[in-house]
Image (cartoon, rainbow, N blue to C red):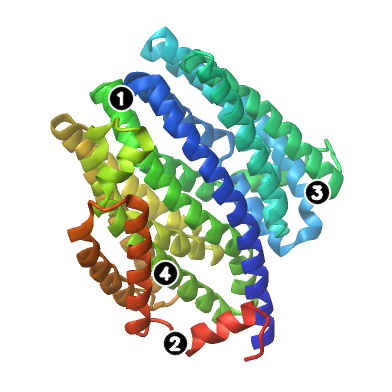
Amino acid sequence: MFSGYMNQIQRIVKNMGVTGTAQILTALISFVLVIYLARFLGEADFGKYNFAFSFTSLFVIFADLGVNQLLIREIAREKQLSEHYVNNAILLKVSLSILTFIGIVLITWLLRFPKTLSILLYLFGIYNILLTLSSTYLSLFQAWEKMEYVALFQIIERIIIVTLTLTVLFMGYGVIAVGYIYMLAGIIDMIVAVTISFKKFIRPLFKIDWELQKKLLIMGLPFGLNSLFAVFFFKIDTILLGFLKDDVAVGIYNAAYNPLLSLSMIVAGIVSTAIYPVMSKYYKKNKKSLEKFTIISSKYLAILGFPVATGCFILADKFISILYAGGYTSAIIAFQILALFIPFRLVSSITGTLLTSINRQGYRMFSVGISAAFNIILNLILIPYYSYIGASIATVLSELLLYTLFFFYIGRYYKTIKVNQTFTKPLIASIIMALTIYPIKNLNTFILIGLATLIYFISLFLLRTFGDDDRLLLNNLLGKEA
């Protein structure tokens, strides 16, 4: 049993390596894009860009309704049904996508947005709809644990968007041209995903199975509501800032929020994407291994999350200056506040994945829904008085609530998994790191980061954070004998 467990761990690490390499590469490319968008567009147009993207992201949930997440779980368990599931899912989602775009057009008309913003909403709406359609095929790759195809897709998409967007920005075009680039990228996304799927995995079939369509809608609904609540959770602050304040406030807030959210989502995505199919499989076959996966992944994400949050808090002014060439200084305080959510976001991605894997996605949905509602209420209270600072506080408090709810439902409906006890030593090591580098924070930023990293890991070893299980795991991953 142990050798089988270790073989699965090695496969997970391989998939994490493939996914991680792609996500790190695409993240670096995307960081360049965000930096130049903020610099070239200015606070107001950068605010329009983020508002349009967030607003349409909310609507396109109705083009998916949780089907993609359901496909990963079901195909991971019964791969022979891949062709039947994916083709019916696409047929279903084309109809949903048409209805979704009509909804975007109607809402844009009813709210009487300015012309520039209306055009952006249409363009980003088309892009996000095409992305959710192409993601149906990515769900197939993920269920088969063929993460290299997911990686290929992600890299191609980012290169297209960043290369063409930077080109139009340097040519002097504005935010509308950026919207057209995204729409073009959505079309190419669809072509790439379809080509890989039909060449490597399935054949195109256009026979509708009405019973399966009904199953996809009903069983996917908890996933869909979870995604809807998640978009509220992550994007409602941007949307409410746009309604209650102005484009400048949206731009400043997203200058602080986007880098931190991207960083946390990349790291969490690398792990959760790789372990979700395995968790789903082990819930049926080996619950002891499922518990081990949860504890060890949470432990290492905490080891990563605490020092990153601490470093971002202490060196916020330096990071903002580097990212935006001395601009967006108003975003520094928001950046410091938002950095605090990183450890909780990372671990919540694991515990949320566990809830889905054990067929408790309804409780994951409910937790995200409660946290999203809490986030909306806090934003409505805080934004009128504190603008983007209030939105930052609301985000951190909502992350803490979500973190707590996930653990509550896991303990109540599955078993108590002792994850929190692995956080103490990373937290202490992060505090030691902070106390050491704060007095010398005026040094060169890259020297500071190197010193902080060295101090942190020395502290972890002195605190005996890594035991025999960690050494055994490392040896097996490296192919060495125990």
Label 4 sits on a secondary structure element that is: helix
Q: Which residue appears farthest toward the left when viewing the image?
A: 385
Which of 403/344 is in front?
344
Mark 4 to mark 1 CA distance (whole Å): 36 Å
Q: Earlier in the sequence, mark 2 or mark 3?
A: 3
Mark 4 to mark 2 CA distance (whole Å): 26 Å
Which percent across, then down, holds residue 363?
43, 58
For label 1, the residue is 242
Which label is found at residue 467? Answer: 2
Q: Badges 1 and 3: C-beta atoms under 8 Å apart?
A: no
Front: mark 4 or 2: 2
Task: Give the residue type that dot 2 points to.
Answer: Gly
Residue at left offset 60%, top offset 62%: 16
Mark 4, Cα crowd under 10 Å, few <14 / some 14-19 / many 20+, is: many
Front: mark 2 or 1: 2
Which label is found at residue 410? Answer: 4
Task: Give the residue type that dot 4 points to.
Answer: Ile
Q: In this view, does 439 lie above or below 300?
A: above
Q: Which of marks 4 and 1 is nearer the N terminus?
A: 1
Which percent across, then down, holds residue 311?
30, 57
